[in-house]
Each structure stands twice: as C-alpha cells, then as structure tokens.
Image (cartoon, helix red, strand yellow):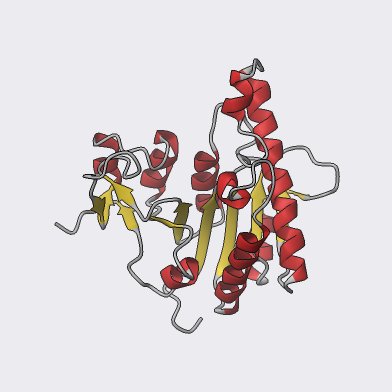
Amino acid sequence: MTGARYKRILLKISGEVLGGSSPGGFDVDFIKDLVGQLKGVSDLGVGIGVVVGGGNVLRGSHAQHQGLSRVAADYIGMLGTVINGIALRDIATSLGLDLRVMTCLAGSGVVEPYVVEEAIEHIEQGCPVVIVGGTGNPFLTTDTAAALRAAEIKADILLKATKVDGVYTSDPMVNSDATRFERITYREAAQLELEFMDRSALWICQQTNMPIVVFNVHEQDGVRRIVLGEPIGTIVEGVSND
C-alpha cells in the first residue's frame, strides 16, 4: 500500500452529483472519471466502500411534496440508490474494475444482499463495494447510511463528496462572506448547527470516532489525493488542534 494514508475508506456521493445536469439521468463522463479514481485507489491496495444517494432518480422529499406519504417517498428514494449502484457497476465493468453492489433492501437477484461480513470479504479481495438502499428504513438519510456502513466495514475515514470544497460557517453559495474550516470537531459542528451532514450521521461518526473529510467532488483526482494524505477540503474529527 505504497504511499496510502488510509487502509480502507467509505465514499459518500449524492445522486444529484451522479446525475450532473441531466435530471433523472446520469453524467456518464463524470461517473467514468469517478470509477477511474476508485480503480487507482484500489490499485494502491486501499479497500473501498461507497454509499450513493438516489436524488438524480427521485428525491424522497420531492415525491412527498407531490402527495406521497413520507414512508412511500423514502422507499422510492432508496430504490433510486439501487438504480445508481447498477449504473456504477456497469460502467466499472466496462473500465475493467470488479465492483460489487450490495443492498439492504429485499432484492430480485439484480444486486447482492448486504451482509457486513461478505462486504468486508469483497473489500479485502480488492473489489470495491457500493452499498445501496440507504439504511433500509424510512426517515433516515443516506448520510446516516454512510456513517453506519463506514463503521460496519471498519473504514478508517468517511469521505463526503459535495458541490463545495469543505465545511463553511454558512452556505457559501448564498453567503459570499462564509469562511471555510480546515478542521473542526464533531461537537463544534453540532454547536454551530452546520448543515454539511445530518445530525444523526454526525452523531454516529462522533460515537465511532470516524473522521470525515468533506470535499468538492469535482476536485481533480480528489479521492486519490485524500487517500495519499493531501490536505483537501475540511476534516471533521474528535479533537481540535487549537
């Protein structure tokens, strides 16, 4: 594992990012670039887990506004993550990466059922694992799923890919005076009510002492550079260096 700072990572990526500017579809060029990064990281000997959202297919919150119940809307959103997992696997296969997709929802044989021990076995054999279906329960986000899966697969760090380059004092897309943190603790993030990750996910990371790196998904070769120890984005962890 020459040069790699982490032995195992969990990457959380939203469905909106996978969809790019194509509502309801896929940004194939972006996904190819992402898969290429995952392959490069895997070639370093790093184990990889990925949790994806389903917002490019249908956001549960949007479905709810259209008149569906919250429970039905959330299950539709979870099924959207399965669709994204299948797309990732197909593109990965075309690029020579053996990527597995596992779900905690009842499946039809299209993807594997999520079993922690089997997921870890895949990862240890050098196969990245995309874990879909959220937590399998309504009312919980894919952020929470990512925090849970990171702990379950014994990841060293959770990488949250976003549209901005870290955690800010407020939304930088709305407030031009917002400033970026290089480091912040879980407690500080909760006290400041920063909205880069939902509260339940942040709490799980705090309880499991899982460090988080929040970074811009369009950062050139960002995943590999983080794995190699470059200071990209904002790191969220338990102890402040101040």
User: Residue shown at 65%/15% (left/top)?
Assistant: 67
149 lies above or below 241: above
Asked if residue 227 lies left or right of residue 96, the reply is left
Q: Is residue 183 visible?
A: yes
Q: Where 151 sits versus 73, above or below?
A: below
Farthest residue, direction left: 242
Image-quadrant location for residue 23: top right
Horizontal side of 13 relative to 63 (left or right) equals: left
Position in image of residue 219 (x %, y %): 44, 64
Residue 118 vs residue 137, the one in the foreground: 137
Q: Quadrant of the C terminus?
A: bottom left
Is residue 116 among what the camera can see?
no
In front here: 220 or 48? 220
Find the residue positioned furthest to the right. Answer: 109
- Judge by depth and name the residue closer to the eye, 2 or 166: 166
Residue at horizontal 75 percent and vertical 52 percent from the top? 86
Residue 111: percent from the left, percent from the top?
Answer: 79, 50
Query: Measured from the top left, where is residue 173 in percent x and y?
Result: 35, 43
Residue with the most extreme bottom position: 2
- Could you tell me how many numbered marks the image carries? 0
Residue 103, picture quadrant: top right
**Measured along the vertical axis of the image, is residue 230 above or below residue 58?**
below
Task: Name the residue: 35% across, 53% down.
Answer: 166
Image spot of residue 57 (x, y percent) = 68, 39
Above or below: residue 108 compared with residue 91: above
Q: Is residue 8 left or right of residue 39?
A: left
